[in-house]
Amino acid sequence: MKKLNYPFSHEQVKELKVGDMVLITGKLFTGRDAVHKRLHDGVKPPVNLQNQIIYHCGPVILQDKKTGKYQVTAAGPTTSIREEPYEADVMRDYGIVGVIGKGGMGPKTLKGCKDYGCVYFHAVGGAAQVLAEKINSVEAVHWLDLGSPEAIWELSVTDFPVVVTMDAHGNSLHADVQASSEAEFKKVL
Amino acid sequence: MALKKKISKKAVKKSAPKKSNQLEDSLIELIKNTSAVLPDDVQKVILQALAREEKHTTAEYAMNIIKANIELAKKKSQPLCQDTGTVLFYVNHPVGLDQIEFTKWIHKAVVKSTKLGYLRQNSVDSLSGANSGTNIGPGHPSIHFHQHKKKNIEIRLMLKGGGCENVGAQYSLPYTPLDAGRDLDGVRKVILDAVLKAQGRGCGPGVLGVCIGGDRGAGYIESKEQLLRFLDDKNSNKDLAQLETEIVNTSNKLGIGPMGFGGKTTLLGCKIGVQNRLPASFFVSISYMCWAYRRQGIELGTNKQIKKWLY
Ligand code: SF4
């Protein structure tokens, strides 16, 4: 088990390899379809994303009516491949160190990881409760005009569990498993 | 299971003095329990899969997180997964039930359960993209009524997530890319192909519901109804029973593993049904269910209270 602690850096994540099980402590910014599209369109982000991690997640968030405080009740990953057209450019333009999601991403993002020193972390799909428990608090919210699930939520997390499935050296666990399972499939046909 | 007994007792106790409708209360209890607690037969195979994976692998890591999530959701009575999926009701009832009236109560219960957070706002107008916010809309929730000779009403509920629904597939045999003909071996090939194509994207390890035959629509409906079977039951058709076992064993040899991380468990189960077909058609319809296999059922008592949990 490896640990990745805030503040993150490209040097740190470059040391991670495909298959590494990692516990992330620090800050995450949620961002899914609408955020990626906006960033890709060149809209300046409301926060500096340099050395940050984007989490593909549309959390379920409740706001306490009295205190106004936000509480995350479910926060599992959403399918990442929808951001395939944008992610490599977001890596290039905004200096993020990685993304968290599920299902893996394609060749364009894999190349982006290599070119800009980033990694793809896979969270366990469906584990909404376990992952929500790792979130200590909501620090801020930006671009709420996109709707709650699509907004950028700044989350403080402790020991958030993920697996590196695409690293900064051109390796992809998804491509490997695809290839080995195809080879097995041919044998059983 | 102790918890189920507790819940049903609570539901019975709670309902008596209240003015609100007993049927609505029972339905809400069903929705809440389905969303938060995996049925025993599913939990059992997940624990078996965890035990099978090698220690300190990503596969074991994923299965451990899944196990922890199941326990936590149950403890907090919160949705297991934030995607509470397509809401599918299957109602078995005696002759004479007013289905229009019954549908109204289901709608009421769904709206209330959405407000209470047991269901996510998950129903979107396909043309405008607008979310109804209530889980009600054309086709939502999906309700299937079946008449039966018994006197009781049984309601089964399945919540089927979008990620796994997206990796479902329908094949028309013969399927030349795989040399799959119109026989059980051809059926076997295309089912395995669907597993291969899904990789980990359906939040595996998963369970397949399959229908051989039917038209395109009936095939998919039956493939989902197969998912209502107990995981440890045995297909009464000997050939299909054998095929079910073979699909699970062979899929697990593909090494796709939990979440597609690689590992020993790719499938937790496979259930296959069959329908007649036209001479000209031969469809194999496959529905993939993620590990968050949320299905539960209730038998109603005479006052529409929950008499018995079905899984
Ligand atoms: S496929 Fe299942 S476990 Fe995965 S996100 Fe969808 S509902 Fe949740």
Image (cartoon, coloured by chain):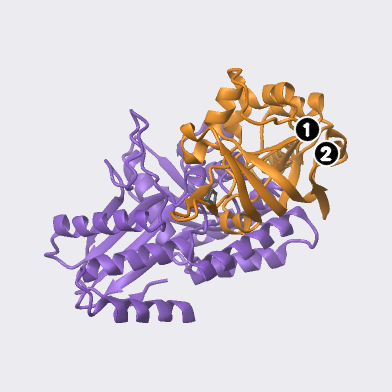
Left or right, residue B218 beside residue B181: left
Q: Residue at x 33, y 28 (%)?
A: B127
Residue wearing tag 1: A118
Q: Give the SS element for disc 2.
A: helix
Q: Residue at x 29, y 46 (%)?
A: B136
- Of the chain colours in the picture, the one used for chain B is purple
Left or right, residue A171 beside residue A133: right
Q: Does the beta carbon of the residue at mark 1 sit less than 8 Å from ligand 1?
A: no
Measured in 3D between alpha carbons, the distance from the residue under mark 1 to the one under mark 2, in whole angstroms, is: 7 Å
Residue wearing tag 2: A13
**Residue A79: percent from the left, percent from the top?**
57, 39
- Of the chain colours in the picture, the one used for chain A is orange
**Residue B81: percent from the left, percent from the top?**
52, 54
Within 10 angstroms of label 1, few (less than 14), some, or many (20 or more) residues?
many
Query: Chain letter of disc 2?
Result: A
Instruction: Please tell me which of labels 1 and 2 falls first in the chain.
Output: 2
Q: Nearer the viewer, residue B69 or A155?
A: A155
- The image quadrant of residue B225 is bottom left
Amino acid type at circle 1 is Cys
Q: Is residue B199 visible?
A: no
In the rendered image, the residue lying farthest to the front is A67
Question: Do marks 1 and 2 share a chain?
Answer: yes
Disc 1 to disc 2: CB gap under 8 Å: yes
Q: Which residue is drawn at 60% across and 62% down?
A: B69
Image position of A106 with respect to B96: above or below: above
Image position of B242 with respect to B287: above or below: below
Q: Nearer the viewer, residue B305 or B253?
A: B305
Q: Is residue B122 visible?
A: yes
Query: Chain letter of disc 1?
Result: A
Amino acid type at circle 2 is Val
Left or right, residue A49 beside residue B276: right
**Residue A102: percent from the left, percent from the top?**
63, 42
